[in-house]
Image: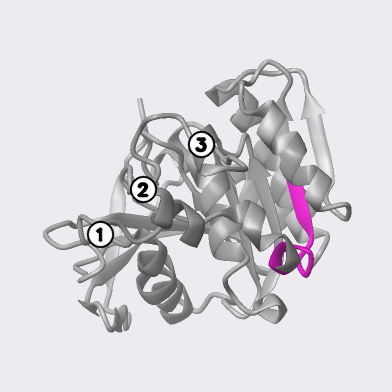
Amino acid sequence: MGWRPSRRTLIRTAVIGAAGAGVAWVATRPRDLPTGVTFVEGHFTTPRWPGGNPWWGVAIPARPKATVIALHGLGGDGKRWFDAYDAAQVASDTGLAIAAVDGGSTWWHARSSGIDTGALVSLDLIPALSAAGLPTDRLGFTGLSMGGFGALLLGSGLPPASVIAIAAMSSAVWPTWASVPVGSAFDGPDDFAAHDVFGRADALAKVPVWLACGTEDNLLPSNRSLAALLPHATTVFDAGKHEGDYWRGHLPAAAAFIRDHV
């Protein structure tokens, strides 16, 4: 079972931007949160998700060194980082604020449905984190599976000076449109071409990159192919499957990689 905060103190922070007004609150979990870590969460009403009300949250250690945006995988949500992968403890251990947001099954980019969760991150989440007083001029990205793809996509799309590092786990990436499995990742070949991370090797070469993938994961070949285009990348291709135990076990190393580049 996931946790829910037992006490909430509303704070009227300026979570206001192009999306309109949102409400955030500080939540404390004396028995669950690591010492010195606070939690802020809220929901967005945003044109980036018509009719939606995506949740966002961030675990904040004392005097955070930087802010990491963690992107979930297909079938997950933002809360899973804190419910299943101990992101609050990782925030405490590394001194990094770790933030997450709901992304549905939209693959962290604009879709024909009208939902654009990539813009949700840049135009809603990052301003909300800034309004909460976090250092959004020093951003890191991490993610798993669909979110690993999103971390590489979004992290390579921002000015390199503002992105500390990208640490992607079990990234759902493919080198060609023909190699993409049938599913919901892209609306068609043009959509794939516009969001192909293999085509962003030059941009990714300007940012420290860490790639992890299990040797029993069917995405390992495509992760190795991406790594071959990024000779500067740190790679961890070790025992593991495409599953929660692998991601929970590797999140501390992913965050430490980002911390070491602050």
On the image, the x and y values in percent for residue 53 come to 19, 57
Residue 38 visible at all: no
| Residue 148 covered by magenta stretch | no
Badge 3: residue crowd in 10 Å (few <14, some 14–19, many ≥20): few
On the image, the x and y values in percent for residue 258 come to 74, 57
Residue at the image point whose x is 24% and y is 57% from the top: 112
Residue at the image point whose x is 45% and y is 38% from the top: 73
> Residue 188 has which mark?
2
Closer to the camera in the image, 171 or 224: 224
User: To which quarter of the image does residue 206 belong?
Assistant: bottom right
User: To which quarter of the image does residue 119 belong?
Assistant: bottom left
Give the mark nearest the N terminus, 1 or 2. 1
- The residue wearing badge 3 is 178
Badge 2: residue crowd in 10 Å (few <14, some 14–19, many ≥20): few
Looking at the image, residue 46 sits to the left or right of residue 92; the answer is left
Closer to the camera in the image, 107 or 76: 107
Q: Which residues are magenta?
A: 203-210
Residue type highlighted by circle 3: Ala
- 1 vs 2, front mark: 2
Residue at the image point whose x is 57% and y is 45% from the top: 148
Give the residue at the far left of this rendering.
51
On the image, the x and y values in percent for residue 188 come to 36, 48
Give the residue at the far right of this rendering.
231
SS for callout 1: loop
SS for callout 2: loop
Residue 155 visible at all: yes
Colouring scheme applied when the structure was drawn:
one colour
Location of the C terminus by quadrant is bottom right
- The residue wearing badge 1 is 115
Residue type highlighted by circle 2: Gly
